Structures are given as structure tokens and as C-alpha cells.
Amino acid sequence: MQSGFWKAGHTPTLFAAFLYFDMSFMVWVLLGPLGVQVSDALGLSPAQKGFMVAVPVLSGALLRVGMGVLVDRIGPKMAGLIGQAVVLAALAAAWLLGIHSYGQVLLLAVFLGVAGASFAVALPLASRWYPPEHQGTALGIAGAGNSGTVFAALFAPSLAAAYGWQNVFGIALIPLGVAFVVYVLLAKDSPDAPPPKSFKEYLAVFREADAWWFMFFYGVTFGGFVGLSSSLTIYFNDQYGLSPVVAGYFTAACVFMGSMMRPLGGMLADRVGGIRALSIMYAVAAFFLVVVSFNLPSSWMALLIFACAMQALGMGNGAVFQLVPQRFRREIGVMTGLVGMSGGIGGFYLASSLGLSKQVTGTYQTGLLIFAALAVLALIGLTRVKTRWRTTWGAVGVSAARI
């Protein structure tokens, strides 16, 4: 860790942002690890299974924009409190009333998207406390809250086997409640918050080409991460016949590797520059996604390759958000929402396309290959903009951070 980092910002807020993000991501992808049991109980087709686990991702993506606007209007702490209250209420209703149809599980999926929108709160909450040279590290730590997907994959299938999948929604209220209390006590809005912007100013961001580039770049890195996090339990169960519990363990291992790489990706970007770090991650992720698409003969081989792909995608997430605050520091709230939305849309596409690929072709290969191609396109795009970025807003003397 760089010297002076812990003195540069507000550590209690950074921890509160991480824990809030962590528990929110745990429930955001909850339907993925429960997908096998839920689909068996409701009699879902492969395409319906893929859509079920993709809807929370899409809902979270779209809600991130609104949450980003809310952050700029009322501050990240209050926005986070509102979001957590909505998720707690939705899980309590699902637990007490029960889920009895495909339509009901999709309705719950929409509300779970509010947990995914925590991204647009936790990152500005942490970011506003830290100077440019520590943005990659700070946002990498806060963003490592996506490790909550590990807990979902690790514990949800076994808890469902022991107590029934519907009761998992009630059990999830316990860690969420703890995170809520910690957030109330420790989180604090930075005094360096930018003034609220008008609707016209929000729309102005769309006229910036760099905003679209960041949206695309994160759509690939985070989209790949969360799409696989939501889909791998179903994949390992369907492709290799693993039980839901064992498939959950395999998924947890992959997600853990990807989650732990996010802060390292941010720190690496601080040291060598976000563009260079991100370029390497796209190339590595594309390679391993192509390899795993060829229906590897062993589940353990698939686990190893998916883990490597997830590490690259996780590091890429950290690298993208080393760059975003340098280019859009005063618009970080709305940009976090927009970029986060694009990441969720990428995850929705991957999760739903894997289910559709399986139903139409009988394998997951097409879905994986198309996403690998998107990673290659992102690498090409990054190569096109890097010179302009390094000679304008990322030039020495303009930014204190390495671009």
C-alpha cells in the first residue's frame, strides 16, 4: 500500500462503503447461486434460467443512473440508506410471502437490482475523500465489495439445501442488517462534494466521447465479471453435472479470484497507468474466454480457466475506475452511475446470452466467444484513444496520477 494512503482520506467511510457494497452485491446476484433449486421448483427452461439471473443485473444497471443522480442531489450517505432500506423490505416480503411463480421471481429480481445500484453510491462515497494519486487504490478497496458475490455462491446453495431456498432470503437479512448499522455509524459524506447539477448538465456528459468509451470499457470488464458470477453455478451444474452445492463452491472460487484482483488492478493502474494495465487485462480475459468456450473435458480445467478470466476482468474493473475520476472528477456521481449502468448491461447481456446459447445451440460456446470478441474490440478501442488521453487530460502537469 502506498505510503500516506491511510492518512489521505477517511478510513471509517472507506470501510463502511466496502461493507455496504459487499453485502449489497451478495444479495444482488443471489438468484444465480440459487438458480438450480429455483428452476427445478418452478420448472424453468434454459432461456428462462438465464433471464432470471440476468434481470437483477439489468435492473441494477438501469437504477445506477438514478442512484448516481440521487448521490449528487442528497449525498451518497443518504442515498445509500434509502437503497438499503428498499432491499431489506424486498427480501423480507419474499421470505414472508413466498415465491410461487416465474413472474414473482422476476419481480423480486427487479428489486434486487436496487442492491446492484449500490455501486453508484459506494464509489463516490469513498472517492470524494481521496486525492487523484490515490483514486485507484481507494476505489479498488471500496470496489472490492463485489467480493460479496463470493458469499452468495459459497453459502446460498448449501443453505437452500438445508433450510429451503425461500428461507435463504430471510437469512440474508441478518448480514444486511449488520451492514446497515455499520453504515449509519461510520459513513460520512466528504466536505469536498461538488454542487448538485441541473438536468441539462447531466445530459451534457453524453456529448463527451470519453464518457461513451468508459461506458463500453466497463461494460466488458464488469459485465464479464457479474455475468459470470450470476451464471457459473448453473453452468457447472448443467455442463458437468455438479450438484448445486458443489457448483456453488466452484463459482465462489472463480468469483473470489476476480474480486480480490479488483484492488490490485487499481493499485497496478496507479503505478503503471490505467491504460497500460487495462490493455493487458483485456488481452488476458479474451484469451481465457476463448479457451473455456471449447467445452473443456474436466470441470476442474474449466474452473482454472474461468478463474484466470475472472482475475483479468476483476483487475480491469479496478483499472477503469483509476481513470474515470481523473477525467470526470466533478461529475463522478453521474459518471459512476452511467459507467456502472453499462457494466450491468454487459452483465445482463452475458448472463442472458449464455442461457439463450444453451437453448438454441445446445452449448454455451457461442455466448462465450461473442463476449471474448467484445474484449478484443475494447482493446482496439483503448489503443485508439490512448494517445489523445495521454496528451490532454492525462498529460503530466494536468493530472497527478499516471494515465
Image (tube, rainbow, N blue to C red):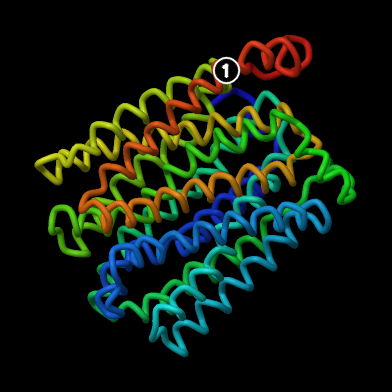
Q: Position of residue 199 (x, y in %)?
A: 86, 51
375 on left or right of 393: left
Q: Residue furthest front?
A: 360
Above or below 159: residue 26: above
- How far across and how far down the image is residue 331, in percent? 78, 39
Residue under label 1, please give it: 273
Residue 206 lies left or right of residue 387; in this view the side is right
Q: Splitting the image into 4 quarters, where does residue 153 fall?
A: bottom left
Judge left or right: residue 172 versus residue 289. Answer: right
Tally the numbered discs. Answer: 1
Q: Circle 1 — which element?
A: loop
- Packing grade of label 1 (10 A; few <14, some 14-19, many >=20) is many
**Residue 65 point in image, percent of width and height:** 69, 53
Left or right of 140? Residue 130 is: right
Residue at (74, 46) in percent of width and height: 334
Q: Quadrant of the C terminus?
A: top right
| Residue at position x 68%, y 13% in the image | 388
Residue at 51% across, 36% down: 317
Whether 258 is drawn above or below 251: the answer is above
Q: Amino acid at mark 1?
A: Gly
Could you say which is closer to the camera, residue 69 or residue 39? 39
Can you say whether 259 is above or below 48 in the image? above
Percent coordinates x, y for residue 143 in the rendering: 54, 43
